[in-house]
Image: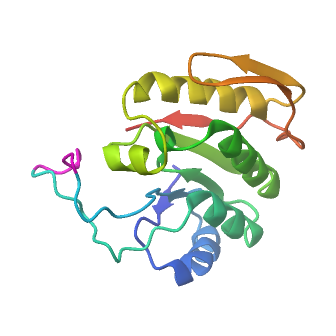
Amino acid sequence: MKYTCSVAMGPVDQLIEIAKTAEEVGFDSIALPDSLFYMEKQSADYPYTADGSRMWNADTPWVDPLIAAGAMGAVTSTLRFYTNVMKLGSRNPLLLARQVGSVANLTDNRFGFGVGIGWAPEEFEWCGQPYAKRGARVDEMIEVIKLVLDGGMVEFHGEFFDFDKLQMSPAPSKPVPFYVGG
């Protein structure tokens, strides 16, 4: 049996020690949550509680999961890391491909990319991304990210993203596993 340690809302200054200890006691992986910011007022209910309220407040720590994976990977040798889940809809897929590829390379392919759409209209709007058609946009983002991570010169011409030949180097030496969740 394999065990995962979730570090959701944990103290940022303890993440490195948590990773070392998790590896020492036999955990297989660490799940890294994602949240861009806390909105004082939200226009949509949080979908994962009965009353729509969030389970955290403005002071709850949310370290960037990709940076955390790189830092934790530097002090471990067998522990795997995955985002649980990174909200893609408010982000740029080419930048994410670069970041995910870097983490995969820095951790010797011990990284998996857990992705979701995101639920808060404000996260999209305030990051300059449309909330409408977010599902189709995220589907296309996953295509773009996987394509770029595969390595070599690639181009993409879709509904939401359009670019001529480019290459990210170095590409990960193994495919990055993707996990789609909500």
Colouring scheme, one of rainbow, by chain, secondary structure, one colour: rainbow
**Is residue 120 something that shows in the picture?**
no
| Above or below, comparing residue 60 to residue 102 in the picture | below
* Left or right: residue 89 compared with residue 140: left
Q: How many marks?
A: 0
* Left or right: residue 41 compared with residue 13: left
| Above or below, comparing residue 59 to residue 176 in the picture | below
Residue 178 coordinates in the image, percent (x, y): 59, 35
Q: Residue at the location (48% across, 49% down)?
A: 127
Is 44 included in the stretch rendered in magenta? yes
Q: Residue at the location (47% across, 47% down)?
A: 85
Is 166 included in the stretch rendered in magenta? no
Residue 8 coordinates in the image, percent (x, y): 42, 64
Q: Nearer the viewer, residue 71 or 44?
A: 44
Going by the picture, which residue comes out furthest to the bottom?
Answer: 13
Corner quadrant of residue 172: top right
* Left or right: residue 121 compared with residue 101: left
| Above or below, comparing residue 180 to residue 139 in the picture | below
* Left or right: residue 19 compared with residue 73: left
Dominant secondary-structure state across the stretch colored magenta: loop
Corner quadrant of residue 70: bottom right
**Is residue 126 something that shows in the picture?**
yes
- Quarter of the image containing the C terminus? top left
Residue 12 coordinates in the image, percent (x, y): 52, 78
| Above or below, comparing residue 25 to residue 81 in the picture | below
Q: Nearer the viewer, residue 103 or 138?
A: 138
Q: Residue at the location (32% across, 43% down)?
A: 121
State the extent of the magenta-drawn residues as a range. 43-50
Residue 162 coordinates in the image, percent (x, y): 68, 22
Q: Nearer the viewer, residue 18 or 135?
A: 135
